[in-house]
């Protein structure tokens, strides 16, 4: 059997751990040939691939990013895209695909399964917003990086007695903001799931200053002020229709400075959150996902995604996994509000 592997969407710590597990188990347990398609769905569209042997994955467990590279290519936006993929798979004698990605990548995987291509999905996103799995790999690393940044920024904020607004990733879900904000002892946490009152934020900030402490505000990039709109960094859209967001941190810092008269600065963590070495937790989770994805292919169980439920790895339908984003329940946010101000 010949099995293809690809990584789509944004890069994410742990991708290489999945690839390593798939290759090791695919070859050593099943005797398969493994093929890596480069640059996400662009690979099977154009035939850009490379063989994957044991030597290719020997030292990649701790590496960030993906040795297969990635892209946000959407084959359903390409004329004849599905037929091109079918033709490439037939030419390269690939019997099945393991697609590692988030909502968009796995949404394509679901449609390709419906169109007769055997695909198994592996959930990947630092935002932890993919449905049907308790956690996605990459999230723990992103939270750890953001928390370390918050820890470091506490000291400079206190030294200069200024407010610091830290913008983290999170377009529609505030999981990174919530977890890093709680772990880092933030004075305020703002998420896309609940519009925020600037007046309330200012009140919390002033309360913090009155107690002779410097406020730390953690805000997800997709957070919205009441009656406001998303702060767009550019008007560009990718092939899945997503507009690039950014700017809420700087906007909020200016608002705080203007209303309090206190010095306020913004720090945008950006792509640093998803770069570098994955945490031990993400290495283990990604490895387990890869091993169980191989089992699904061996069983001919296509159109599924491997998922974490409690401590078990299970299979769920791709249609279930991509039906809706997993956002932060308001009760989780309310737990954190006791620490605001």
Image (cartoon, rainbow, N blue to C red):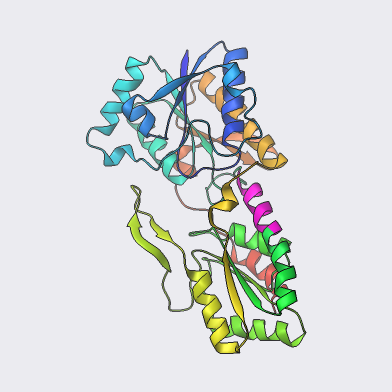
Picture mark count: 0
Residue 280 location (% of width, % of height):
72, 40
Q: Main secondary structure of the magenta part?
A: helix
Residue for point 57% across, 83% down: 257
Question: Residue 150: where, in percent of width, then height?
Answer: 69, 63
At 75% from the left and 69% from the top, the residue drawn is 155
Q: Is residue 132 visible?
A: yes
257 left or right, relative to 112: right
State the residue lying farthest toward the right: 211
Picture coordinates of residue 303, whole percent (x, y): 45, 31
- Give whichever of 222, 321 is nearer the camera: 222
In the figure, is residue 48 to the left or right of 153?
left
Report the side of 281 relative to 54 (left or right).
right
Vertical position of residue 52 compared to residue 303: above or below: above
Where, quadrant-wise, is the C terminus in this rendering?
Answer: bottom right
Q: Residue furthest left?
A: 79
Camera sees residue 196: no
The vertical placement of 242 against 67, above or below, is below
Q: Quadrant of residue 78?
A: top left
- Is 222 drawn above or below residue 307 in the view shown? below
């Amino acid at each position: 059997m010949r099995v293809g592997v690809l990584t789509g969407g944004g890069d994410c710590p742990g991708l290489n751990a999945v690839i390593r597990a798939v290759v090791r188990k695919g070859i050593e347990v099943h005797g398969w040939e493994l093929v890596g398609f480069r640059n996400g769905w662009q690979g099977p569209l154009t035939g850009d691939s490379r063989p994957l042997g044991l030597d290719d994955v020997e030292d990649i467990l701790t590496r960030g990013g993906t040795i297969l590279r990635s892209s946000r290519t959407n084959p359903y936006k390409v004329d004849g895209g599905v037929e091109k993929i079918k033709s490439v798979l037939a030419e390269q004698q690939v019997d099945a695909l393991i697609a590692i990605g988030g909502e968009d990548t796995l949404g394509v995987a679901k449609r390709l399964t419906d169109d007769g291509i055997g695909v198994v999905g592996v959930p990947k996103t630092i935002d932890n917003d993919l449905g049907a799995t308790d956690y996605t790999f990459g999230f723990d690393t992103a939270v750890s990086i953001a928390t370390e940044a918050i820890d470091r920024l506490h000291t400079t904020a206190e030294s200069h007695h200024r407010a610091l607004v830290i913008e983290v990733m999170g377009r529609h879900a505030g999981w990174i903001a919530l977890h890093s904000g709680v772990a880092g002892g933030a004075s305020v946490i703002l998420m896309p799931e609940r519009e925020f009152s600037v007046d309330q934020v200012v009140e919390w900030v002033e309360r913090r200053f009155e107690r002779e402490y410097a406020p730390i505000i953690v805000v997800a990039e997709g957070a919205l002020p009441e009656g406001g709109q998303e702060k767009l960094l550019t008007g560009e859209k990718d092939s899945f229709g997503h507009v690039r967001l950014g700017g809420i941190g700087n906007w909020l810092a200016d608002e705080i400075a203007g209303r309090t008269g206190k010095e306020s600065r913004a720090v945008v963590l950006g792509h640093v959150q998803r770069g570098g070495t994955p945490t031990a937790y993400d290495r283990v989770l990604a490895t387990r996902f890869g091993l169980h994805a191989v089992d699904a292919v061996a069983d001919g169980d296509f159109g599924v995604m491997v998922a974490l439920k409690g401590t078990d790895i299970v299979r769920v339908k791709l249609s279930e996994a991509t039906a809706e984003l997993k956002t932060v329940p308001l009760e989780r946010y309310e737990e954190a509000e006791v620490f605001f101000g």
